[in-house]
Amino acid sequence: MNKKIILFILLISAFFASCSDLEDIIDVSELPPLQTKKLLILSEGGMGLNNSTLALFDLRSNFKDLDYFQTTNNRGLGDTANDILKYGSKIYLVINGSSVIEIINVENGKSLKQIPLKTTDGKSKQPRSIAAYGGKVYITSFDDTVTRIDTTLLSVDGNITVGQDPEGICIKNNKIYVANSGGLNFMSGDYDKTVSVINLQSFKEEKKIEVGMNPNKIYADSEGDIYVNIRGNYTSEPAAFKKITPSTGVVSTIENVVATEFVLVNDKAYILLSEWGKPSVIKVYDCLSEKLTTETFISDGTVIDNGYKINVDAFSGDVYVNTSDFISAGSTFCFDKNGKLKFKLDKVGLNPCGIVFLN
Amino acid sequence: MTTQQVFAQSTFDVSIDSLHQLPEVVVSEKHSDSEVRSTTSMQILSEQSIENLNALQVSDAVKHFSGVNVKDYGGIGGLKTVSVRSLGANHTAVGYNGITVSDVQTGQIDISRFSLDNVNMISLNNGQNDQIFQPARSFSSSSFLNIVTKVPDFDNDKDLSGKASFKTGSFGLLNPSLVVNFRINNKLSSALSAELTSANGQYPYILHYGTAGKDSTSLEQRQNTDVKNLRLEGVLFGNFSDSSNGNIRFYYYGSERGLPGATIYYNTDNFSKQRLWDKTFFTQAHYEKRISGKWSVQGNAKYNYGYVRYLDPTFLSTEGRLENIYKQNELYGSFSALYRAFENMSFSLATDVTHHTMSANLRNFANPTRLTTQSALSAKYVNNRILSIASLLYTHTFESVEIEDAAPNKSRFSPYLSLSIQPFEDFDLRIRAFYKNIFRLPTFNDLYYSIVGTRSLKPEDANQFNLGITYSTAFGAWLPLFKFTADVYHNNVSNKIIAVPNKNMFEWSMINYGEVKIDGLDVSVESAFKLPNNWNLMLSSAYTYQKALNISDRQSSIYGHQIPYTPRLSGSGRALIEMPWFNVGYSLIWSGARYVSSQNIVENRLDGYFDHSISVSKSILTKIGKLAFNIEAINLSNNNYQIVRNYPMPGRSYRTTLSFNF
């Protein structure tokens, strides 16, 4: 590894970080790899099928292990894995159906600890999404809570109640933002409409901001603005893409943009729009200029059917789209930052979702 | 006698001729001949066969038929549905004493509710049976599984008969039952029966954390598997004259059970909390009369009430639980007339009207009502060597709802044609063939279920072609019975009703999409040997080959793949040795590997299995009746095989039965 480049990145990052937020803790391992050499792709599997997988792809040797977790640990990952996060020397896997957090070693994939997430009355919490900051990871769960796990002790060190069925989570400027979907009330239609704002230090909910029905993913840009996609109720309430300005508390709708899925990396929101039976579309929204800068990101005519999740390699700007038809193992498309297809991985897993980039 | 009793014979009772005069044109035949004379593939399990099958429920017995896939979630309370020849459970009609049991909500009948107590026989027909004098609804499915209960018989001087039975065994099974038959006068008799089944169902199993075979395991016990079922039944039979008879039946079934759920890694506990309550009440009546040598008529009627309550106390919605209550009502009437036009030719016309309603505690549920009229016109030709049937079914539905728009009304003609020929006069080999074009209507769930239902669905179509041979013979005294049937078939299902995420990637709804092509072979052999010293040996087996391929989309990664939960090869075997002292029975169910989802990849593969069981039985004739004792060991190899992935079946278990016939 090129130490000079690391140092350079460190300095640059430290510089920007110190400009925006003096309290930011810079963790070397938080930086994207200089050159992605390996991918870990998490697949949800099907509900009740115990077939979540973590696949390893070595991009140089073309070595692959579609069930890397199983190979390494002689047991399956579990049922319905929803999120994956690399933080420090560990990778955190959020398994919704099995209701556990599986913590593995980045180097060899060995499980360091499996933490079951249960409510006080013994029900499964059903964890959903994860974010990390300052030596802790924070996990949203369908039992309307956020759980904090200490990354040294590898144990739960707190729970707080938020809105209903929280989905996405992000951390910025000493605050944790959680999108409360109320998605499990789909039968009654009583979706939640809020984002919870949690004080990082006190680990207490400060307030709820109303953003629109059924918020889903949530990310922050470097200016501290919070972006959230609203899914609506699929009938009368339409989907929307919104911005929260924390300093004023104002929620503004970004006109003419909706997102099935999105991810915010390097101040760009990469938006995936999927409609069954039609090619998926990727758009790029610049969070600094606050403009939709790219209407059709894919520039070489590549057609993606059933785009399911989107991930972006923060160092290279490569955009990864996972596809799913829900019945067969999906593919992963990798585009360079100019929207040209670099490579495509087939039969990655059933319902591939998150990706961790390793060097 | 009802028409369905015509088949109510023991397959091994080769010596007894038919006692029932069929109203249709028939050639006098032995009871055991039904399977070989049938123009469609027909399989029968008689009471005596069932007794030696190591079967507690109807589903256990049905697994012995060829061409059948019982989707069994394991244990007494586990859901069990029947798909025949890969057409899907929605295409299988289940009849109780000839009248179809319907579930307009799901379109699938959970046969775990039917016990084998008081069952006289179970028959399975592909296409339809050779009776043309029956309700129109009996023509309206691609296969028909009929459960026929016993008709009381009385010794000459007695007006009371019956059976008391008590079963107990592993996993807390307690199963007392009582049947009492009264002769009221020489025209009327009645039968009352009651049965209670209760079990904790907690069987041990090994949980494998992976499918590779080298993964870590843990020894677990199946939880939330308790079952409590009560069945009460009363029938009044009338034999008014030589030319007219009828019956009226009242049936109640109540059940509470735990749903043990999939064995989710690291979290089996939370997935085994759901409960299900079932209540079914129906009353059905049958009357038939021969008006003249040429004319017969019959009428059938039914009222059915169904109630299902489902509770998931772990569901993390605001309420902290998910509770669904579904209620169904059915009113049904049928009239059929038979005309014996010529010595070898008869015609029939049947008209049925069914009125279905459903309500549910779902927000904005449509509370749909469906009125279905079905009419069937049939012709049948019979002589000693030829049997042929043609029928045309017309179906029309009228649908209405309380909220929003109703699904469009449907109307369809469904043709059917079958033929059986015996080419050589003195050689009981028959060649048979049938064709049927049929459909299944979209269910109320398909059409109206919150969020996913689609009102514009078309029916799902099925085409069936079958070509087979049957052969039956006897060799002197030592082989009184040898029967062989083999059928090849080609089925095709199109406009399949499936759920897809049709708008974006998280809003699912029902659509008509896709096609399945099925080529298969069913073979069955049955034989009885008379051995020295009064020993008898009966052997039978069934074999199934099914190539059921998804041919929906040539571009898809699953094109040409075997459909889920359908083994290429499967089969069953039975043996019974009758000795002067006691009888020993052996039964085997086996299946090849299957795929648990549409893609045929190794990760989705589920291993095949063998399930062996044995029983020893003894009966003693006393002055006051017959006392019978039976002890069974089920799944001898103690393998927690899976029919449905993550739903392990019970390992080795034992059962004992004491019964008294009076």
Image (tube, grey):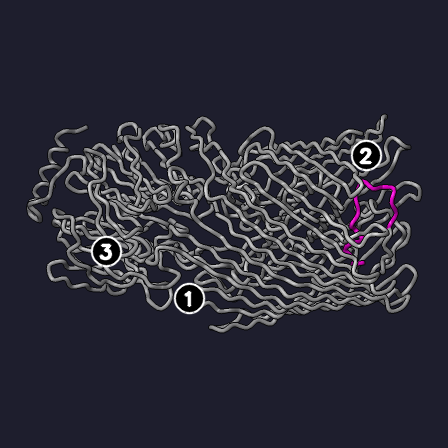
Residues beneath discs 1 and 2 located on the same chain: yes
**At 83% from the left edge and 42% from the top edge, which residue is drawn?**
B13
Q: Callout 3, which amino acid?
A: Tyr
| Residue occupied by mark 3 | A285
Q: Is residue B564 visible?
A: no
- Rendering coords of residue A285 (x, y %): 23, 56
| Residue occupied by mark 2 | B528
Which of the pair B644/A302 is nearer the observer?
B644
| Mark 2 Cα-neighbour bin, 10 Å: few <14, some 14–19, many ≥20 | many
N-term mark: 1 or 2: 1
Q: Callout 2, which amino acid?
A: Ala
Q: Quadrant of residue B549?
A: top right
Q: Report the predominant secondary structure element of the magenta stretch.
A: loop
Task: Specify start and end residues of the magenta stretch as a single range.
Answer: B1-18
Q: Quadrant of the N terminus of chain B?
A: bottom right
Is residue B217 rendered to the left or right of residue A244? right
Q: Quadrant of residue A16?
A: top left
Q: Are marks 1 and 2 in contact (CB under 8 Å)?
A: no
| Mark 3 Cα-neighbour bin, 10 Å: few <14, some 14–19, many ≥20 | many
CA gap, disc 2 and disc 3? 79 Å
Residue B363 badge: 1
Q: Is residue B303 visible?
A: yes
